[in-house]
Amino acid sequence: MEILKNPNEAHPFDYYIQDFEVYKLDYDFFYRNSFGLQEYKTPYNLTFYHLSCYLNHLELAFDIQTRTSPVLVELTPETNTLKLTCRCEKVKTKLCEHQAQALYLIKEFKNYRIYFDAYYRKKEMEVAAKEYGLENEPNLDDYFEIPFSIREQTIEVKLKKKGLIPINRSAFDRFKTIFSPTLNFKQTEENLLTTSEFIVLSYNSYQDSLNIQVHKAQLSKEGKLKNPITPLDADARLLDAETMKEVKFHAAIKQMSSYRVSRDVLQRKEIKAIKEIICNPLKLPIYRHNRKKSDNITSSSIEQI
Ligand SMILES: [Zn+2]
């Protein structure tokens, strides 16, 4: 760290420290560069008026007189230049006691230090950054901030950019809840009472083919299927799957609904698919399509088996 090169440049109010690093603030530094060292040897006995503190900025006062002309500490991060301003009478060939005390506060108290020590701040923010997958971002100050707390032990990292989504387990669960209504992850209880999902086996003797699909229909008050009966999209239902059995089931349904296979040439993969469907992990009712009644699947052309 470098102080004023030429004493003639001494300013009545301002004092600059170039290449400022908090960890370099040792006893020797204060001894060489300040007046009135004795007064701030016991930092925990400091009496001061806190005015404001945020990133690279601290403003405080030490007595009633200077409260109206406070000590201002500002760090320019691009050049790492620390500017300390005090309007007391001491010409600033060295730090006046007020400036020195403010600086000592930054060195000794974590809740002040964090705004002037980029390395320390980064370490504190990294824990939160990990939650958002941002631990490798070079400038975490762009994403997070630390509201000032007068209590030294309370350093809380908060999100600056709203809308970032953490990538941990609890966030995933919350995410699922938010999107459930639109993706229909789980049916609501009301839906369960008034709609039914079921498997329909449809054998076409003319084409000698078997078609298996999951359908959905509203239920009447008596619990009977109502028209229209609509086929469910097996791809969409794969998203609903919560177990491997269900995944296999929907994949099998997909296979058996998009390929009309001849019973005579059932291949290994079709047999496997039918086995998965027979497992019926969702315990869906099974209906048989009676083509004599209608080529279409309606409430009167299917019967439960
Ligand atoms: Zn002063």
Image (cartoon, rainbow, N blue to C red):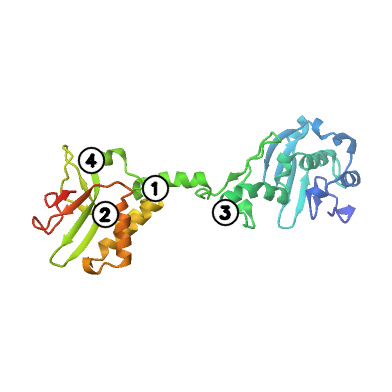
Classed neighbour count for the residue bearing mark 4: other residues with Cα under 10 Å, few (<14), some (14–19), many (≥20): some
Residue of label 1: 179
Tag 4 or tag 1, which sits nearer the N-term? 1
Q: Which kind of residue does numbered mark 2 sit on?
A: Leu
CB atoms of marks 2 and 4 within 8 Å: no
Circle 1 residues within 10 Å: few <14, some 14–19, many ≥20: few
Labelled pair 3, 4 in contact (Cβ < 8 Å): no
Whole-angstrom CA distance, mark 2 to mark 3, is 37 Å
Instruction: Work out whether 187 lies above or below 297.
Output: above
Residue highlighted by disc 2: 232
- Name the front one of labels 2 and 3: 2
Q: Secondary structure at mark 1?
A: helix
Q: Which residue is mark 4?
A: 194
Q: Marks 1 and 2, how far apart in space? A: 19 Å
Which sits in the foreground, 59 or 199?
199
Q: Residues within 10 Å of mark 3 (few under 14, many from 20)?
A: some
| Between marks 1 and 4 in the image, the one whose residue lies nearer the viewer | 4
Image quadrant holding the N terminus, namely bottom right
Residue 74, horizontal then vertical, whole percent: 73, 47
Across and down, in percent, residue 10 comes to: 85, 50
In this rendering, would 213 be left or right of 164? left
Give left or right: position of 274 versus 106.
left
